[in-house]
Image (spheres, rainbow, N blue to C red):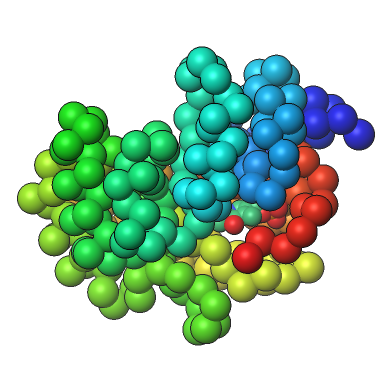
Amino acid sequence: MSIEANLTLIREQIAEACRHANRPEREVALMAVSKVHPVEALLEAYAAGQRLFGENRVQEFQEKAASLGTLSDFEMHLIGPLQSNKTTRAAELFYAVDTVDSLKIAQRLNTAAQALNKKLPILIEVKLSHEESKHGVAPDDLTALIAALQPLDSLIPSGLMTVPPWSEEAETARPYFQQLRRLRDEQQQLCPTLTQLSMGMSNDFAVAIEEGSTCVRVGTAIFGKRPRPIE
Ligand SMILES: *Cc1c(COP(=O)(O)O)cnc(C)c1O
């Protein structure tokens, strides 16, 4: 199927999940995750009306951005781990950084955004499983991190993000989605701008929507299998 046909299908599935969860469709954004795919794939999705995208690596998007020319009416989010030596680049290139998991990274992004005279929306990535490979702040450290973000004027802490352990079975992810939602509800009392919940991928976005997701990050179901592994 074409990227356009895939997008149409996913949007229908999102609409269906929203109906099922009794939520208005406009509460759930579809992010197209174009990592590892060539820039042509991104452009095809753009031509089909897609405007919200996610890429995993600063370097990879920097290379693609060069081919995007004057195209600017789209939002590209960084959804992969960010090293502190890439924060300046990230603040320049991306509309938002969805994987902030330390005060050090937040401070560096804030300094970079300030120098660019821009406000950078961020999500805090939370690590809910004990897998070695996963990034994110531990739930117990979330309150302290969010409190420490308050003075960072050039950042807009907008919500939480998580990547649950991978499973064939979408239901396996449900408890993680529920936990992220509880954390968001708690933290929103302290930081009212924390409204977003970025959770759900190709195989489990319907479950994530039932549990309150406001942004599903879909790669494979739009662009097909990735030609090579992520990292
Ligand atoms: C790759 C990736 C996705 C998309 O995963 P699919 O299973 O291909 O939909 C979503 N979020 C993050 C953080 C990713 O790295």
Q: Quadrant of the N terminus?
A: top right
Residue 96, quarter of picture: top left
Query: On the picture, is 10 further left or further right than 164?
Result: right
Residue 169 falls in image quadrant: bottom right
Is there any visible trace of residue 141 in the rendered image? yes
Image quarter where the C terminus lies is bottom right
Say which residue appears at 53% left-offset and 68% top-offset.
Answer: 176
| Residue 158, image x, y percentages | 32, 44
Residue drawn at the location 63% of the way across and 38% of the way down: 32
Residue 56's place in the image compared with 126, above or below, is above
Where 45 sits versus 57, above or below? above
Q: Quick check: 32 left or right of 141? A: right
Give the residue displayed 20% in from the left and 47% down from the top. 110
In this rendered view, identify the residue nearer to me: 56 or 206.
56
Residue occupying the point 65% across, 42% down: 34
- Left or right: 79 in relation to 35: left
Where's ligand 1: which quadrant? Answer: bottom right
Residue 131 locus on image (x, y percent): 54, 82
| Count of marks, rendered view | 0
**Along the viewing direction, whichever of 41 and 127 lies nearer the viewer:** 41
Q: Residue 114: image x %, image y %? A: 16, 38
Query: Is residue 214 shown to the viewer in this render?
Result: no
Vertical position of residue 207 compared to residue 40: above or below: below
- Residue 184: image quadrant is bottom left
Residue 128: x %, y % from top left: 46, 74
